[in-house]
Image (cartoon, helix red, strand yellow):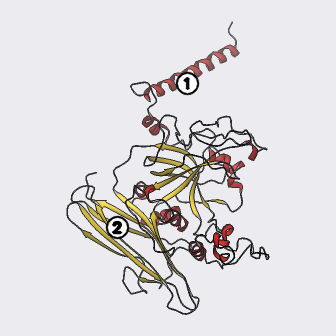
Amino acid sequence: MITDYELEVAFMKRLRYGKMLFILILLSAGCGPDGKIDKDFFNGLVRSTAQSINEVPGSCMMSKHGPLQTPGKWLPVKTSQSTKQEKCPEENLSIVELKGWILKIEDKCHHESEGPDLRIDLEIDTGAIAAKFGSDQEGLRTYLNKLVRVGNIYMYSPDNFARENIPISGVSSRSLDWHSVASPLAIHMEVWGWQKKLHSLAKPPDSWKAMPSTTCDIRDNEPVLWPFDPHNPWGDTPIKQGDYVVVYGALVTDNPHYSSNRAEIVGCGFLPEDCGEPDKLDVLRTWYGAWHCPNDLPIIGKICPDDLDGEKDELNPARWTEIHPPDNIFPLSPPPIKEQSFAVALLSEHCLFGPCKEASFAQQLELPKPTPGATLRVVELVSQEPAEGPNNGTIVFGNHERDAALNSGAKITITDLGQTYARVHIEATVRGEGGWGRPGRFKAVYRLVWENTNL
């Protein structure tokens, strides 16, 4: 006689076999003619629900045991496009999806006090983002200016980032000084690794492995474990500079790294070999509005209050955004390029006796049309973020030319050069106020959009 228990066991076996058969059907549907996994199929199957390659994402581990616990260092950036990490929804994470082109991927990892990491830079596809917002231009303005802050523009300006690593956008600008900078819309990413000596009280996930293609020095006889191979995330297609990818990961801001380099500003008289780029650091502080306090002076030592210049303030525009870490990097077929984008940051410091020194930006580009007869449209998205938005009356040349009371953006001139080219000229000037008034500042994102194409 068959007992109820035996019936239950038989039912569970049949249910298990049914599940296995269903999975095998899915796998066979996702295989190409040679029997290998077809990534495009799985992209369509899991992309809407799976945010990570590993069952234990790097963002969850970082939030619980890693760098995201460092106060004021990496701060989550909440946006209209942010979601929770499905694998650890209780954690304070802001997961976003970005598409774009890899600008740079490093060969070797970096050993940091918070843990080893492998660094990648991504140029953002603003067209993919704009498609999500549709006609909501205010939402797009806010999102792009949260995504790319003043700190990002300084990081990726051609003075700071090797020109050969910016091959995609076709937009370049060599700044005259650090008061006027421009860059492609780009973001830094760091895949985080695990080393036991740095996390002695926690156990690494079993699914994290040492990756042979990721060059990382073994220190203290401990290999570095990774949630996936940063150079080959899905195991069958190595990623390289110029590849188009979709990325899921934790959006954070990193501090501007200037409090530890005060000697570069105030110590030049004592330590000339440490002067570095004092103007850049000076301008970054002025964006925040910080008083320039000397610190770690010879003999005197520390005299400044903690965080006087706002490194840990999440509203500090000199902080830059990062995907730290990415939980998924997935190669895609590149789309036709229908737009190019860049960002501009201008700052004129206030002064006691005016007129103060102006800061200007003038960019003229001759762009090849993607198809004959295409027309160019320029979308200007002026930042209204705290400490980034323009101070009224300080844009002394712009969309109303010399009428500072009316200027709210740059002067933009588009010239059609026939079937194959178009020219765009973008120009703005800001001037700080005398009597130690307000600084002149201006930050904007520009989308150069091609219309009337058959792409």
Residue 143, how many percent across, how many down?
49, 62
Asked which quadrant contains residue 287, the reply is bottom right
Residue 82 as seen in the image, left or right of residue 359: right
As displayed, is residue 332 above or below residue 444?
above
As displayed, is residue 451 above or below residue 26?
below
Question: What residue is shown with label 2?
Answer: 378
Question: What residue is shown with label 1?
Answer: 19
The residue depicted at 43 percent of the width and 46 percent of the height is 243
The N terminus: image quadrant: top right
The residue depicted at 69 percent of the width and 78 percent of the height is 293
Residue 222 as seen in the image, left or right of residue 408: right
Residue 76, how many percent across, how many down?
62, 58
Q: The residue under label 1 is which amino acid type?
A: Lys
The residue depicted at 67 percent of the width and 77 percent of the height is 266
Residue 326 as seen in the image, left or right of residue 66: left
Residue 308, how many percent across, how many down?
70, 74
The residue mark sitting in front, 2 or 1, is 2
Badge 2 element:
strand
Residue 125, how many percent across, how many down?
43, 55
Neighbours of disc 1 within 10 Å: few (<14), some (14-19), many (20+) = few
Indicate which disc, 2 or 1, sits on the residue closer to the N terminus: 1
- Per the model, the C-alpha gap separating discs 2 and 1 is 53 Å
Neighbours of disc 2 within 10 Å: few (<14), some (14-19), many (20+) = some
